[in-house]
Image (spheres, rainbow, N blue to C red):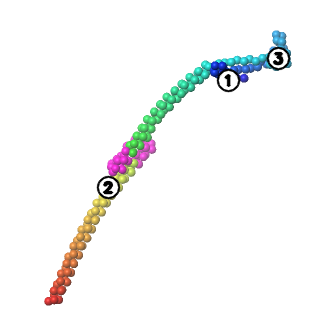
Amino acid sequence: QWTIFKGSEGDRILAFVEPVYNEPLCYNATCHAHPPEQKVLGVIETDFSLVPVDRNIHKLIITTTVYAFFFLSLSSLVLFFILKKFVLAPVAALSGAMEKVASGDLNQMVKITSEDEMSILSNTFNVMTDELKTARESMKDWTKILEAEVTKKTEALRKSQDKLIQAEKMASLGRLTADVAHEI
């Protein structure tokens, strides 16, 4: 049976205890004087110090911890650069372009050459900006047409108003003439 216990100095000790059984070869031999009824002849006990094993385990824990730290640091650094190149930089480009579009500059185009969602997003942004630019130009053209129509109708109303004023003058003159003719 194997057991581990603390020694007097606090070190771990592995103990092995095994009984020595009285077997037929032993109690039938001429050199032994053990009766067959005695089942156990004795006990073998050995103690092994685990200090060297514990030192190795401690060294392995430290080494594994150091390697794990360096591996995680390197992995984090590589992951940061990958994320920066494939996520952060495209998002920053899109964000900057959106700010410029929001301020009125519709000539913004985002060029992302990767073959992933960021490329699809930039292409969609470019199409949207193009459509906004076309819509703004159409609105400007439509505004010019409306202004021309308003100017034309205003001119027509002014001419009609001038004719009404002239007609009112003629009617007043006609009444004056009729009054004068009646008096005469």
For disc 2, the neighbor class at 10 Å (few under 14, some 14 to 19, many from 20) is few
Q: Is residue 22 magenta?
A: no
- Numbered disc total: 3
Res 179 → quadrant: bottom left
Give residue 80's mark. none
Q: Tell me the residue at 24%/68% (across/down).
A: 155
Residue 26 location (% of width, % of height): 81, 15
User: Which residue range is magenta in the image?
Assistant: 96-124
Distance, label 2 to label 3, CA atoms, is 112 Å
Q: Is residue 118 magenta?
A: yes
Q: Earlier in the sequence, mark 1 or mark 3?
A: 1
Give residue 24's mark. 3
Q: Tell me the residue at 43%/46% (across/down).
A: 120
Q: Is residue 56 left or right of residue 95?
A: right
Q: Amino acid at mark 2?
A: Glu
Q: Earlier in the sequence, mark 1 or mark 2?
A: 1
Residue 150 showing in the rendered view: yes
Location of residue 147 with respect to 107 vertically, above or below: below
Residue 75 location (% of width, % of height): 48, 32
Q: Compare residues 26 and 57 and report the one nearer the observer.
A: 57
Q: Tell me the residue at 56%/22% (across/down).
A: 59
Residue matched to label 1? 4
Label 2 element class: helix
Q: Amino acid at mark 1?
A: Ile
Whether tag 1 and tag 3 are in contact, CB under 8 A, the answer is no
Residue matched to label 2? 137
Q: Amino acid at mark 3?
A: Pro
Location of residue 48 with respect to 183 vertically, above or below: above
Distance, label 1 to label 3, CA atoms, is 33 Å
Distance, label 1 to label 2, CA atoms, is 87 Å
For disc 1, the neighbor class at 10 Å (few under 14, some 14 to 19, many from 20) is some
